[in-house]
Image (spheres, rainbow, N blue to C red):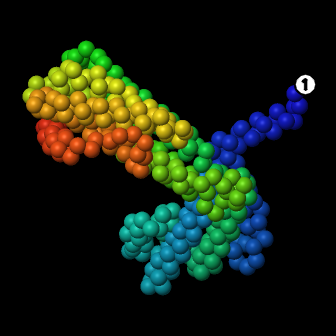
Amino acid sequence: MPDPSRHRLRLLGTLLGQPRLLLAVKAALAAALSWWIAPHIPGVAANYPYYAPLGAVIAMYPTVQSSLREGIKAIIGVVIGIGLATLVIALQTGRPGVLAVAVVVGVGVLIGGIRWLGAGRDWVLTVGLFVLLLGGANSEDYSMGYIVQLGVGITVGVVVNIVLVPPLYTTQAEKRLRRVQASLADRLDEVAGVFEATWPIEDDDWERRVGVLPETLRHVRDTVQFADESRRANPRRIFRGRDIAGDYVDLVVFERIGFHLQDIAEVSGLIARRVPGRIGLVDELAAPLARATHSVAEVIRARGGDDADAFRRARRDVEALWRDLDDRRRDAGELSGGISVAVSLDRVVAALDPGDDTAPRPTDTDSIETQEAHDTDSADDQAEAPEARSGD
């Protein structure tokens, strides 16, 4: 019979594994602790306990690093706001007038435009107005209480964030990288399917799916950077010390592949639709193009594992494609599409493992120069065909 206590602990662990729920629990705990501590702060600050929970909330961010950074910036913003209000109060007598309010708001908005202040930008104006309008004759005591209690709350928030399950997001980053890796391989297989289809075709689904890759890769980059930040100042990294440097390497590789894949998808669309006068390919080259494209897709899919055979096969098929292109160089007008795709496939393989030499590469200097010349012409042709991206 299952142990009910273990089941409850497992359920609690699952719930706390939800980032937003965990953040809410820690924010609530930090605010409660701050409110309990605030009245015991010696001096005039004890008269302003309500700013302590506010400080705890200000400092509660998803990562320890961001809690420390934004908490410090919030304190800096508060100090600037207090300094601004104090200066305006010193330059006038009696109750704050219209001009005093205008000066604090105007200067506060200007200072709030300094990006470096981060979370502190919003507090310059807010604290400045509070001190000016609520501090009154006791503006010095009010300012001191404000900054001390806010500092207490921020300190409590940071400590709670460090002690209570400080989150690590390295696993999520790895999972997203593996998903985008599979997606890149699948998209390239779809392009290979275009070369295996009967032309002309009207379908543009593969172009649409390739078109979303840049946005997907931007999200993956954000995830990797967030995972990297979650490791900093985090004591849990001692026990879960996975190095994220390899994730950055994979990310750069996948971004380069995505760039070349977009070019391949655009060219394949022009070829498959038989767009007149744009880019050409003789029918006999469709099969070697499909074979080479499938092989390169397998290299992408095999990355991170035993990929030596996949590299050999891909480079052999791409080399065979180059030979077929070279044999038909007299039909230059009908080769531009094949040359463009072959160059992109070469670049994808090089991005995956630029130092790999387990399979032959094109070595005929004259052939390579001819290929590059045709590739340049192909690039010019593509630049004249903006409608090819209309499905993205």
Q: Quadrant of the C terminus?
A: top left
Residue at image location 55% in from the left, 64% down from the top: 70
- Of the pair 325 and 276, the residue shown nearer to us: 325
Residue at image location 60% in from the left, 48% down from the top: 169
Query: What residue sits right under mark 1 in the picture?
Result: 1
* Residue 209 horizontal side relative to residue 264, left or right: right
The spot of residue 277 in percent (x, y) is 9, 28
- Of the pair 353 and 143, the residue shown nearer to us: 353
The spot of residue 292 in percent (x, y) is 34, 30
**Label 1, residues with CA under 10 Å away: few <14, some 14-19, many ≥20:** few
* Residue 380 horizontal side relative to residue 350, left or right: left
Above or below, 263 against 125 in this view is above
Q: Quadrant of residue 316?
A: top left
Residue at image location 74% in from the left, 41% down from the top: 13
The spot of residue 288 in percent (x, y) is 29, 25
* Residue 56 seen in the figure: no
The spot of residue 315 in percent (x, y) is 37, 37
- Direction top: furthest residue: 198
Q: Quadrant of the N terminus?
A: top right
* Residue 270 horizontal side relative to residue 194, left or right: left
- Of the pair 355 and 95, the residue shown nearer to us: 355
* Residue 232 seen in the figure: yes
- Of the pair 51 and 190, the residue shown nearer to us: 190
The amino acid pointed to by label 1 is Met
Q: Quadrant of residue 20?
A: top right
Q: Secondary structure at mark 1?
A: loop
* Residue 360 horizontal side relative to residue 41, left or right: left
Residue at image location 54% in from the left, 38% down from the top: 306
